[in-house]
Image: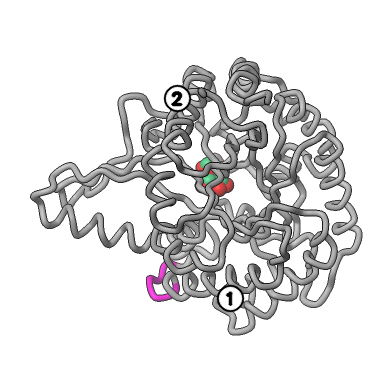
Amino acid sequence: MNRFPKSFLFGTATSSFQVEGDNIYSDWWFWEQKGKIKDKSRSGKICDFWNKYEYYLDFAKDLGSNAFRFSLEWARINPQENTWNEQALNHYDKIIKAVKARDMKPIVTLWHFTLPQWLSEKNGWLNKDSLGYWQQYVEKINKYFGKEIEYWLTLNEPSIYCYKGFLEGTWPPGKTNIINAFRTLNKLIRAHRVAFSVLKQKDNLIGIALNLPSYEIKDPWCIFNILIAKILTHYSDWGFLKYIKESIDFVGINYYFHNRFLCNPIKPINFSGENTSDLGWGIYPRGIYEVTKKTYQICRKPIMITENGIADHKDQYRAQYIKDHIDWLLKATQEGTPVIGYLYWSLMDNFEWQEGKIPRFGLLEMNYQTLEAKPRESFEWYKRIIKSYRSIL
Ligand code: BGC
């Protein structure tokens, strides 16, 4: 049968800092003020999801989706050390209820790259007590929402965070130091395990969202090529997966990249393809199939595509991009890989970290002045795709 089971989760993904607006206690809010964003923009109100969540969730429902991924902003909930914002917790409760009221399953991420500024000022994850602070946060979340949520994602793309924050230096804390990159990665492995043990109940599923690119070794006879591929794969979310695969119920895959390793010390890796997104990322739909199968071989756990998307302001590739990726995903399921969902990144255009407001990943086109969202043509296409790929039985 050329369809996914009825229970398959089709939907979209977002993250708090990128859509909510006015996250004034987050480290990224301070980072932006230092002029670190390429287009010099500030997130400001961005999509104002915090206040207008019903408006956006109506679009998500209209798509025919039955899942919606969003994250909780640690800094909003815990704006100062030992201070908990009950109002924010109650507000998140309203968002969860609004998602459910539209027959969508909330897929909730606990940490999507941002830290409370107070913790960041104390060295963030490198602080000796960071796991204790994290545990307090997760316990609070569990107390409030433990009974309401079936699908949790503990962390988002831990190795990307370490790369950007400690090697490239383009994200907070922006202090390049390779030892600290590894120390932070190690902390995040432990943070995942802490969250798993706090949240785990018999009727919920705990996952993590990992950035898992597909790989291709262009010159298999080139030792340099093989070595680089091995090192980079190990110190990426692929390596991370191996450390946490015992404490996980499902794996969330964020699929964006196909990496071609080249026998070239100056440019050892190439992401581009025949067609590329506005950010220059090559389009390679077959990779989602390869990555899904490989992940299953490694950990034998169900898989959810927690992100897959393209920056395409003209909306010229998006509909085909979604269809092609879903076709390859379907092939993986037909060959026996248990895939439980596909979430497109993102429902609406949003704040693309150091790239600011220019990249447009949304099915909804944002007007950041009027805060109006307008469905792009690909929105209608995704709607049709969901309809035709989901089994009615
Ligand atoms: C991240 C998102 C980001 C998207 C597009 C993912 O790696 O989880 O926060 O916006 O990629 O770059």
Q: How is the image coloured?
A: one colour
Coordinates of residue 362 in the picture (x, y in percent) = 61, 30
Q: Is residue 384 above or below residue 274?
A: above
Discs 1, 2 touching: Cβ within 8 Å: no
Figure quadrant of residue 135: bottom right
**Disc sitting over residue 324 in the figure:** 2
Q: SS of the residue at dot 2? A: helix
Residue labelled with disc 1? 123
Coordinates of residue 200 in the picture (x, y in percent) = 69, 66
Question: 340 left or right of 257?
Answer: right
* Mark 1 CB near ligand 1 (8 Å cut): no
**Residue 355 visible in the shown view:** no
Density class for disc 2 (Cα within 10 Å; few <14, some 14-19, many ≥20) is some
Q: Considering the image in quadrants, where does the C terminus appear?
A: top right
Coordinates of residue 291 in the picture (x, y in percent) = 40, 44
Q: Is residue 360 above or below residue 194?
A: above
| Eye-nearest disc, 1 or 2 | 2
The structure residue drawn at horizontal position 73% and vertical position 37%, both measured from the top left corner, is: 47
Residue extending farthest to the left is 221
The structure residue drawn at horizontal position 77% and vertical position 54%, both measured from the top left corner, is: 149
Residue range corresponding to the magenta coloring: 176-180
The structure residue drawn at horizontal position 67% and vertical position 54%, both measured from the top left corner, is: 109
